[in-house]
């Protein structure tokens, strides 16, 4: 009961968050036949700003991290990011009537990481005096960016296969190269490289970071307006997204917990760190993911992946996932 | 004499304010034949940003207000916002050579509220130890938004009538609906709804609010450039706008003072609150109004309505209106 | 040796600065065949924002300065700004294979002033207890803006001559007028006028100034992408730009030092002030210059002028120029 009411409170809070608020606002406005439009050049620039910021954040985190010490957990984070997308590709996408692009985009979002979810986990670990490595927050780009890149590449491969003639074998490498040259991944990886190799702190703190949430709200509005036009597509499949969004965070978190325990026994990675890794895998991105997927998989329906992630996946990860992994860690520490 | 010199000082200060400074700058630049342009997609986005911010501000004010206690004054504020536009519609617009759209837009601006004017009134009330309700500032969206909506709808009705064949009766409701679906009112009302129903504070404080004045300065520049091209239209009617801009603030303030006194005797609305209501009615918008009217009544000449409001109406409201209403309140309190 | 290692450290720091980092990032992204583009309307607006901010900064500096006291040094600053461009026009541009537009733009950048370079000089003067006039920083717009205007006008004259028939004499005044009406100089001079005549501090501090560095980084990215396409043009002439970028700062600084000494003997301009004037002349703009020249001389190759200025000219001015002028001043003070 406590869980249900907790879940419900979080669900309502999510609906009132600017992210989902603007999305729903856009949906309603479009449903009422409004003529409001955000001009396309502005939309493109907003996406660019968001993606380069996501990359910059990741790059700076990595630059400031102790790479030697975090080698194994970081490798596991990369593996998890990619693995989660493949799991979604071969489960969610195979369900009846689920559009493959939508399923891949959703899996990409669940592979990517929610900063606010793992911030909640860090706070809880601290109140419970469970120690964790200071650099463990820096693991997130190692999971986040591979997941998004994998999703975009898998979607490209699917699209090419679909449109290609049945007889020809599809060659993967040109598609990967093309995906990386697309404007979405270019902006993301350029930001990553600039964050890693230059010192962009001055523009990051005065420009890219403060504008981020606001520009994201505008993007959410645009995606909401588009979602209205495409909500019908989801009628037959909404239940599958709900099932996926409940099961996936817990499953992903448990796999990550297992990999984290390997690092625990192999290199002394703390149990708190294992929890952080599990929460990252359980979380689904509400910030970095939507703009990247919108630009990288334009044919996917935003109502599918954002709905699944923000309305169901995030409350499940916070209200059920975090207590589960902390409980597991405490049981193992006591044992 | 004191009044005149005070008026003159305020007039010069207005000319140096960024709002009017950029407007005049745009006029001069265009008159000198410059090729400077702000690209249209950027202009549209700026208008969107301004209007959604105006709506968000209003929505948050209303959400945080004590609606039961302020019911009667809020109802009077709505009535005043609509009434002022109708007064302008049937006085200013009937004067010789005054273009109806220009007159309606001007009346809309005088019905809308200037934040800086009523901030000046609040400061004065405090220095003079006249108590007023803490929520009285939250009355402004109740006057501001109905005034702007009324102006846009009246202008739509006028345009439709003008272009329609003389024989057919004009049906009002479709025009109201169309006005509300237009991008200007959609953005305004969407912002209002988001401010009222969600918790947009985080994006409001980091994005919509800090960018507001700057984007407004860009809009003023654009409106100035356009004004140059249309200043000739005003040659025959400038005197009427001046007369209106001197008389209207005082008249509107006195009507509001009267309505406020009804609330004073009916529900104990404080005399300080009555002054606030009167100053709101006397003030004309320099912030929320111009972008809304520019987008909602595109055929109206900005030099008419901004010139009347900012250059004459605002100094009159501050230098003459505020002392008048405070004096009235003090006389009534002493009596 | 110390100088060389100092130079190298500064060179690497420049490569990591956001300005050059985004430029190089843009070059690499374009070389890798990315599809990333910044839409043209957004690009135009970014240039507008940057130029009006440069103008606003200059205008406010001048408004707050003591014009009577600084009359002679300010006049010298104007002369230096113009003279440096003419020197470049008749040296760099005459070298084999150097494109005239590229040479003029480079000279314009070396005539313009780098805020960070002269901030470094002010800091050094203070640590060495060499007094200088408080208003000497306000000399920079007097050198900066004339240099940029001169460069754009000279480039226009060159372009017109080139395209005109050989027999006709080119009339200068219409070209100057046309340059001033172009969007680049309009935005710059409009900003200057608004900074000088109105009180734009509120929008300057909340909008134009904080957005400046970030928008500049986006512009640098665009210029980098363009540079890749045009880097081949520089193969034959890179050595000339390097020679110019080493010699010019020292030469310009010495001329300015000489003019400053005239003001020293004529009106008591302090030796510290003479150093400031020399450093301004020695510095080349990394901030105000590139956007102005990009918009004002669109045919010039940004890799030429930004490469020469940021990668070579600035380290030379800081590591060699500043110690040289401070040493000269101390020798003269002691003598």
Image: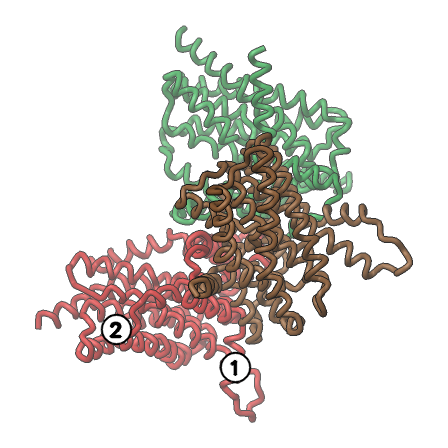
Chain colours: A green, B brown, C red
Label 1 sits on a secondary structure element that is helix
Q: Compare marks 1 and 2 and give the one earlier in the sequence.
A: 2
Residue bearing the label numbered 1: C175
| Residue C197 at x, y percent in the picture | 43, 68
Name which residue lies at 52% across and 52% down.
C29
* Image: B112 above or below A88: below
Residue A8 position by quadrant: top right
> Mark 1 and mark 2, same subunit?
yes
Chain identity of mark 2? C
* Image: B54 above or below C176: above
- Name the image quarter holding the C terminus of chain A: top left
**Residue C130 at least partly seen:** yes
| Residue C88 at x, y percent in the picture | 38, 77
Residue sitting nearer the eye, C222 or A86: C222
- Name the image quarter holding the N terminus of chain A: top right
Chain identity of mark 1? C
| Residue A289 at x, y percent in the picture | 57, 36
User: Residue lying farthest right?
Assistant: B167
**Residue A222 at least partly seen:** no
Residue sitting nearer the eye, B144 or C192: B144
Name which residue lies at 61% across and 33% down.
B197
So how many labels did they put on this image? 2
What mark, if any, has residue C69 been given in the picture?
A: 2
């Amino acid at each position: 009961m406590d869980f249900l009411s907790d879940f419900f409170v979080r669900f309502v809070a999510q609906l009132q968050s600017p992210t989902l608020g603007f999305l729903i606002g856009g949906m309603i406005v479009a449903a009422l036949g409004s003529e409001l439009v955000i001009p396309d050049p502005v939309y493109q620039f907003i996406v660019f700003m968001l993606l380069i910021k996501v990359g910059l954040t990741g790059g700076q985190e990595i630059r400031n991290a102790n790479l030697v010490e975090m080698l194994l957990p970081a490798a596991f984070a990369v593996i998890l990011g990619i693995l989660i997308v493949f799991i979604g590709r071969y489960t969610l996408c195979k369900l009846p009537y689920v559009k493959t692009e939508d399923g891949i985009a959703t899996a990409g979002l669940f592979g990517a990481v929610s900063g606010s979810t793992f911030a909640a986990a860090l706070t809880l670990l601290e109140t419970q005096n469970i120690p964790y490595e200071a650099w463990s927050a820096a693991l997130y780009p190692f999971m986040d960016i591979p997941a998004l890149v994998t999703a975009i590449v898998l979607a490209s491969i699917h699209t090419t296969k679909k449109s290609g003639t049945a007889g020809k074998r599809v060659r993967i490498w040109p598609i990967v190269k093309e995906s990386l040259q697309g404007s979405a991944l270019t902006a993301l990886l350029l930001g990553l490289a600039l964050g890693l190799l230059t010192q962009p702190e001055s523009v990051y703190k005065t420009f890219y970071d403060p504008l981020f949430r606001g520009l994201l709200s505008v993007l959410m509005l645009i995606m909401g307006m588009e979602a209205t036009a495409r909500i019908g597509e989801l009628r037959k499949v909404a239940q599958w997204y709900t099932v996926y969004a409940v099961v996936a965070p817990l499953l992903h978190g448990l796999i990550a917990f297992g990999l984290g325990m390997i690092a625990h026994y192999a290199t002394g990675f703390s149990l708190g760190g294992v929890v952080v890794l599990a929460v990252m895998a359980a979380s689904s991105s509400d910030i970095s993911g939507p703009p990247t997927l919108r630009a990288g998989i334009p044919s996917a329906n935003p109502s599918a992946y954002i709905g699944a992630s923000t309305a169901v996946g995030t409350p499940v990860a916070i209200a059920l996932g975090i207590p589960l992994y902390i409980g597991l860690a405490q049981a193992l520490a006591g044992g």
